[in-house]
Image (cartoon, coloured by chain):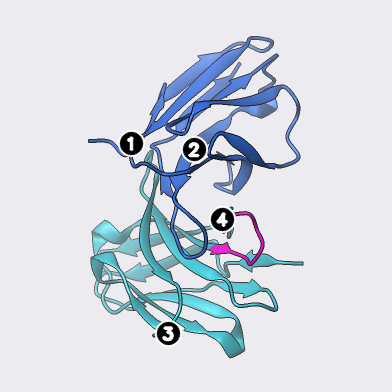
Chain colours: A cyan, B blue
Amino acid sequence: AQSVTQLGSHVSVSEGALVLLRCNYSSSVPPYLFWYVQYPNQGLQLLLKYTTGATLVKGINGFEAEFKKSETSFHLTKPSAHMSDAAEYFCAVRFSGSARQLTFGSGTQLTVLP
Amino acid sequence: DTAVSQTPKYLVTQMGNDKSIKCEQNLGHDTMYWYKQDSKKFLKIMFSYNNKELIINETVPNRFSPKSPDKAHLNLHINSLELGDSAVYFCASSQGEGATEAFFGQGTRLTVV
């Protein structure tokens, strides 16, 4: 079955430290991959997406993600966390033949400590 | 200009009532969606319309009925509201297939008391 897994429902980092949020998918065909961010009481905003081509994708606010087909992963990173990065992060996948819908991971709450 | 707008943002109602949530997008997209986010932040698709035609209808109680009067609007009507319907409902839109991302509204927080 096709699925999306985000390891770690809560991640805490110190300000200035590396942010690493993990996302794995289960599919025999590489899907389209997305990361969204949700700030409190707001909608979801696209951070970045992987389509085809370069496997390292750069997004907004200094975030980037690397698609690794062999590991079926699309982990999100940021070299230096800022207090404003505190939010909920969702990995989303559009599987082949999924009639356009996005399947979301369970989300990771990122806390940035001063 | 707001790309995907939902009204109302907050909705508090009693069990058994009927309510509607409206959604409009001004992006010219051909596909619109309703997602439900539960108290644990889990997002699950409910419905999807492409050019006013229903293309996704997940396992949702038939008390929930989407209506798309045109490509720019997708409303959600809920009959006989139950406590378990309390959640945040997001409208979204996208264009075409493949790598296109979905754009989300701000959400409607529904509380059933």
Instruction: List the single residue furthest toward the bottom.
Output: A70
Q: Amino acid at mark 1?
A: Asn
Ranked by sequence position, the earlier of labels 3 and 4 is 3
Label 4: which secondary element: loop
Please report contact status of discs 4 and 1: CB closer than 8 Å, yes or no: no
Instruction: Please tell me whether mark 4 or mark 1 is closer to you in this view.
Output: 1
Q: Point out the frontmost of discs 4 and 2.
A: 4
Quarter of the image where one finds residue A57? bottom left
Which image quadrant: the N terminus of chain B?
A: top left
Q: Which residues are magenta?
A: A93-100
The residue indicated by pointer 1 is B26
Q: Earlier in the sequence, mark 2 or mark 1?
A: 1
How far, Cα to Cα, is label 4 from label 1? 21 Å
Residue at 48% x, 37% y: name it: B91
Q: Residue A102, labelled with which disc?
A: 4
**On the image, which quarter does residue A48 sit in?**
bottom left
Residue B90's disc is 2
The subunit letter for the residue under badge 3 reads A
